[in-house]
Amino acid sequence: MDFAPGVQIVARILVVEDSPDNMKLFRTLLTLKGHEVTGLPGGEGLLETIARTEPELVLMDIQLPGKDGFALLAEIRESPHGGLRVLALTAHAMSGDRERALQAGFDGYITKPIDIRSFPETVKRALAGETVSH
Ligand code: MN
């Protein structure tokens, strides 16, 4: 799919992220683009939240207390929501996580700290079906 630069895609997006500062940043940037954001600080209640909010995209931190992003992706893939688009949020210092994320079945990854200028466009491309690696 190809979208003209000015065309907005507005979506419901679930962000799973344990850092309050990062969550606030994601929420701000996504809300500015008109997206409807639900946030979770970890995996507790994940499948219930997906069932209730019906997101089009999940942004999943890899490093979480308790179950990590890989374990939570596996839970999503084994659930009735297995076809959901899920992007990994990987830490810049953990370069091995990026390749591992694609191998594990994430629909791409975004590296933190994020580039706030390109982030909205990256999300838009992910919503359009691209595998993003940024
Ligand atoms: Mn984290």
Image (cartoon, helix red, strand yellow):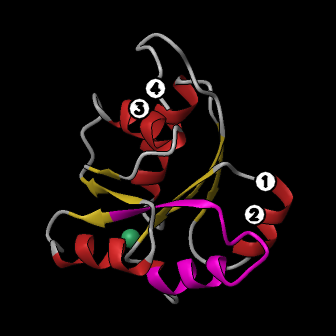
Circles 1 and 3, Cβ within 8 Å, touching? The answer is no
| Residue drawn at (35%, 37%) of the image | 119
Quick one: label 2 or label 3, which is nearer the N terminus? 2
- Three-letter code, disc 4: Asp
**Residue 120, which numbered label?**
3
Q: CA distance from mark 1 to mark 3?
A: 20 Å
Q: For the residue carrying disc 1, how many other residues have a C-alpha within 10 Å: few (<14), some (14-19), or many (20+)?
A: some
Q: Give the total number of marks visible in the rendering.
A: 4
Q: Quadrant of residue 34?
A: top right
Above or below, 6 relative to 22: above
Which quadrant of the picture is home to ligand 1? bottom left
Q: Which residue is mark 4?
A: 2
Evaluate if marks 1 and 2 touch, with contact meaning CB atoms under 8 Å apart: yes
Residue picked out by circle 1: 54
At label 2, which amino acid type do we have?
A: Ile
Residue shown at 42% from the left, 45% from the top: 130
Q: Is residue 128 left or right of residue 95?
A: right
Residue 1 position within the rendered picture, expressed as x and y whole percent measured from the top left: 50, 32
Q: Which residue is mark 2?
A: 50
Q: Alpha-carbon neighbours of circle 3 within 10 Å: few (<14), some, or many (≥20)?
A: some
Q: CA distance from mark 2 to mark 3?
A: 22 Å
Foreground mark, 1 or 4? 4
Q: Give the secondary structure at mark 1.
A: loop
Spatial CA distance of label 4 from label 2 is 27 Å
Report x, y in % for residue 43: 61, 78
- In this rendering, position of residue 20 left or right of residue 74: left
Cα–Cα gap, marks 3 and 4: 16 Å
Farthest front residue in view: 1
Amino acid at the residue labelled 3: Pro
